[in-house]
Image: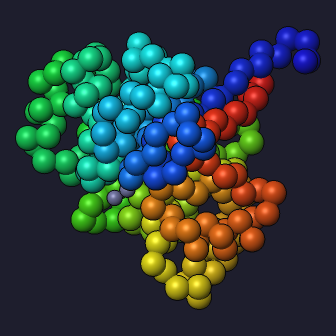
Amino acid sequence: MGKGIIWKMLKISILYDNRSKSRRFTYGWGFSCLIEGLEHNILFDTGARGDILFFNMEQMGIGLSMLEHVFLSHIHGDHTGGLVSILERKPKVTVWIPDSFPESAKFDIGSYGARVRAVSKATRLFKNVYSTGELGRSPKEQALIIDTEYGLILITGCAHPGIANIAIKAKNYLNKEIYLILGGLHLGGYIKKDIEHIITLLKDIGVKKIAPCHCTGEYAMELLQEEYKEDYIDVAAGSIIQLELSS
Ligand SMILES: [Zn+2]
Ligand SMILES: [Zn+2]
């Protein structure tokens, strides 16, 4: 450890996924992860069911008191279904949602006592954490960007707007290279040629490491693993990604 350097650990815990790392964790269709080690902890999406989310949180030693910000990528139930269970138990959180959410949904979230922050354009949440802003349509989706000394970490829910489009947006917005993409890449049902085209795009964009899960699709995951080799990170509910930061 260098003198005068403050080492911090960025920790991303996968709390909800279609697959689980072991039988200690419950799997279910959806995605959620907790990011620790930044100015505030941030829960990315909530999975479909509060009971599964809480079960896996408990297995990973994560208490509700640790949740400060909740970031919802898009309105689909497999990403937002667990939110009410959180708000019932921990209402004092900041919830970042796409501005396209219905007014009734914004009102409902606020009625628990949560602070609602609607995101339209690319924006900074707090130090080193950004949203791509709403991308695509039906549903509009935002992705989370963490700026680290290694490059950008881009976390996606379902990547409905297209993973390459989201990656280009993130890279251009902060004018930095992408170190890691984590989350659902929405390539289930795609044929080989189309998946290979997207992998080529991601390589051209310069995406260094990839941790696909949720709705990526088994075949796409296989092809990504072949291409990314040691830079492919296998994640499922119960997985932890850790990164040492120097400040
Ligand atoms: Zn999804
Ligand atoms: Zn979706």
Vertical side of 99 occupied by 208: above or below: below
> 124 and 91: which one is in front?
91
Give the side of residue 33 with respect to residue 81, left or right. right
Vertical side of 170 occupied by 138: above or below: below
Q: Quadrant of the C terminus?
A: top right
Q: How many marks?
A: 0
The structure residue drawn at horizontal position 16% and vertical position 37%, both measured from the top left corner, is: 106
Whether residue 28 is visible here, answered yes or no, is: yes
The structure residue drawn at horizontal position 24% and vertical position 65%, both measured from the top left corner, is: 138
Q: Position of residue 229 (x, y in %)?
A: 79, 63
Give the side of residue 138 with respect to residue 234, left or right. left
The structure residue drawn at horizontal position 35% and vertical position 55%, both measured from the top left corner, is: 141
Q: Quadrant of residue 198?
A: bottom right
Give the side of residue 74 with respect to residue 165, left or right. left
Q: Quadrant of the N terminus?
A: top right
Q: Quadrant of ligand 2?
A: bottom left
Q: Position of residue 44 (x, y in %)?
A: 43, 38
Give the side of residue 188 with respect to residue 179, left or right. left
Vertical side of 64 occupied by 44: above or below: below
Whether residue 73 is visible here, answered yes or no, is: no
Q: Position of residue 12 (x, y in %)?
A: 59, 34
Vertical side of 111 occupied by 108: above or below: below
Q: Position of residue 68 (x, y in %)?
A: 40, 20
Q: Quadrant of residue 209?
A: bottom right
